[in-house]
Amino acid sequence: MQPDKTAKATVDPSKSFVHDSFGIDHRENLEESFYAQFEDYILDLLTAKMTAPEMSDRGRLNPRRLWRNGIDGNIFDKPCDVPSSDTALVILLDASSSMNDKNQSFDPSWRTSNLDLSAAICSAFARANKELCGNAIRLEVFLKTSTSMNLGSVLGENPCFVTRAYTSQKDMDPKTLLKIETSTPLKQNRERGSSTPEYAVLPAVYQWAHDNINEPNKVLLNLTDGEPMYCAKKVDSNYSSHLSKSDLRNLRYKYLKDWQEICILLGDCSWTDPFVYSDNPIIANNQDFAPEFFSVLSNLMEENL
């Protein structure tokens, strides 16, 4: 089929996934609250690790070990160093327009969306990792989205996008994550909504990680709320508008076999088999997912410090 030259699809250079939001003040308040929780948790964790005494022949005198003087000389306390992590955490955030749906379970006033929560928690964790732990865990945050337009006749397939929104490898302000939005940069005549390509982005993420991540332990945390929409699979002369369960499963098995996988499913999960996404999916199912997200990130911090 020849491309339809009358249809126009362009990339709007003024539109990106990261830009100022009318709700930035609300997200900053959320971020401060989550940061305070991460701070308390991490400081307790670091204190426990660093004050665990290691017996040494030099350091701070421990009067209760003076009886060992003349035996082995180990009468001093020496704080243990917290080792640097050898883990890279890649967070893959759903940037489909449905992430703007309000989360009434978290906020009965209907002010807070799933994207607000995701942005605030990611920013708070990135800031705690940077300011309290010296970026002990390598953190990469990517957004995934695909256009809702039917561009099969124009481009041969509907493209999906994966955007690197934050990295701990550069001197980035973690609060940049508070500005993430769901607008696809591709538009046709007028701007259209975005959907989620789900694991269709894995080939690109895998190749990027292969070229850039040297840490031996790689963790992918996928957070998603919707049914995958990605017109990349040609069936006869038509393009399928959905990734099938077998497509998702095959992509996961092929590209994440050497990764630790964590998947948090939001919203109504009746649209899919959760085990397609992960062997042990975390299902929020229209509930407040913030405690689950916070818990997953806190546990990763504890395991890797």
Image (cartoon, rainbow, N blue to C red):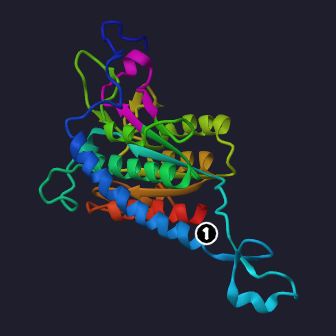
| Residue 292 pos. (x, y %) | 38, 64
On the image, the x and y values in percent for residue 108 come to: 14, 60
Task: Out of 29 and 155, give the one closest to the viewer.
Answer: 29
Quarter of the image with the C terminus is: bottom right
**Residue 246 in sight from this viewpoint:** no
Residue 243, given in percent of the width and then of the height, sits at: 43, 42
Residue found 47% across the figure and 54% down from its top:
277
Above or below, 224 relative to 207: below
Quadrant of the image occupied by residue 274: bottom left
Q: Is residue 92 left or right of residue 66?
A: left
The magenta-colored residue range is 144-164
Q: Position of residue 254 (x, y in %)?
A: 62, 46
Front residue of 77 and 173: 77
Q: Could you tell me which residue is drawn at 27 percent across and 39 percent down?
A: 97
Q: Residue furthest top?
A: 5
- Where is mark 1, residue-wise? 50
For the point 32% across and 36% down, the residue is: 179
Q: Is residue 156 magenta?
A: yes
